[in-house]
Amino acid sequence: MVVRENFQTQLDELRELLIELGRLTGKALDEAIESLKNQDLELALRIIENDVKVNQLEEEINDKAILLIAKQSPVASDLRRVIVAIKISSDVERMADFAVNIAKSVIRIGPSKLIKPLEEIPKLAGTANQMLSEAIQAYTDEDVALAKSMADKDDTVDETYGRLIQELLGMMKEYPDDTNQIIQLCFICRYIERTADHATNIAESIVYLVKGKRYDLNE
């Protein structure tokens, strides 16, 4: 019984670390879009500098998970919990990388006047960040229904992304001197779309955790 309680305590610690990883990543994504809206280059630089915290936390999660497998030799659902923690931490870390990439694009755009009002891009980012938040909540609660709801949100993100890219590329003839900015805005849209994809990956991991079988939410 003591061994089981110790194992559960370590699983709980692993979950708390993942929740913190999600919080830091969500904050980075919010700040990345804020830096874009305000063309705040100092904030963009801080996002890049702070990414080391996310990387260190992901390493800590991986180390703890591997040690847990080595020492406790978990089986069945317990083993899935540890494996899923490793998989989710990888997806969340990639989402943090996309926040860094957005910040780098903000720096490349610089203080140049934006060619279009930033309305849809922040809205798109808000949906992707909501997906991250809900994915972490679904993981915490092992909520399959919430996890599966990611599919509809991902479809919305994909549709908006495709429309925005077409619109931006269509502006190249009208704004030939702003080609760099247009390309960077396209990149930013792509980073947001990939963020939503990784949130969907997390949702699939949650279904696997609870049901013990793979489920493709991108079908």
Image (spheres, grey):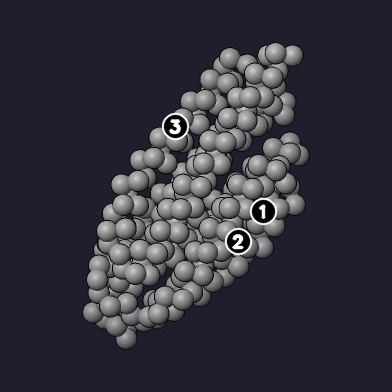
The residue under label 3 is: 59
Rendered location of residue 171, percent (x, y): 36, 81
Residue at figure coordinates x 44%, y 65% from the top left: 189
Vertical position of residue 126 compared to residue 87: above or below: below
Judge the density around disc 2: few (<14), some (14-19), many (≥20) Cα neighbours within 10 Å.
Answer: many
210 or 117, nearer to the observer: 117
**Mark 2 residue element:** helix
Q: How many C-alpha atoms fall within 10 Å of the one at disc 3: few (<14), some, or many (≥20)?
A: some
User: In this rendering, does residue 91 appear at all?
Assistant: no
Cα distance between the residues tagged 2 and 1? 9 Å
- Badge nearest the viewer, 2 or 1: 2
Residue contact at pointers 2 and 1, CB within 8 angstroms? yes
| Residue 44 vertical position relative to residue 118 in the rendered view, above or below | above
- Is residue 159 found left or right of 35 in the rendered image? right
User: How far is disc 1 from disc 3 in space, using C-alphas?
Assistant: 27 Å
Kind of residue sitting beneath label 2: Asp
Density class for disc 1 (Cα within 10 Å; few <14, some 14-19, many ≥20) is some
State whether residue 78 is above or below residue 114: above
> Which amino acid, by three-letter code, is at mark 1?
Leu
- Which quadrant holds residue 156? bottom right
Q: Position of residue 89 (x, y in %)?
A: 52, 39
Residue, disc 1: 217
Choose between 41 and 217: the one closer to the eye: 41
From what the image shows, is residue 66 above or below residue 92?
above
The first of marks 1 and 3 along the sequence is 3
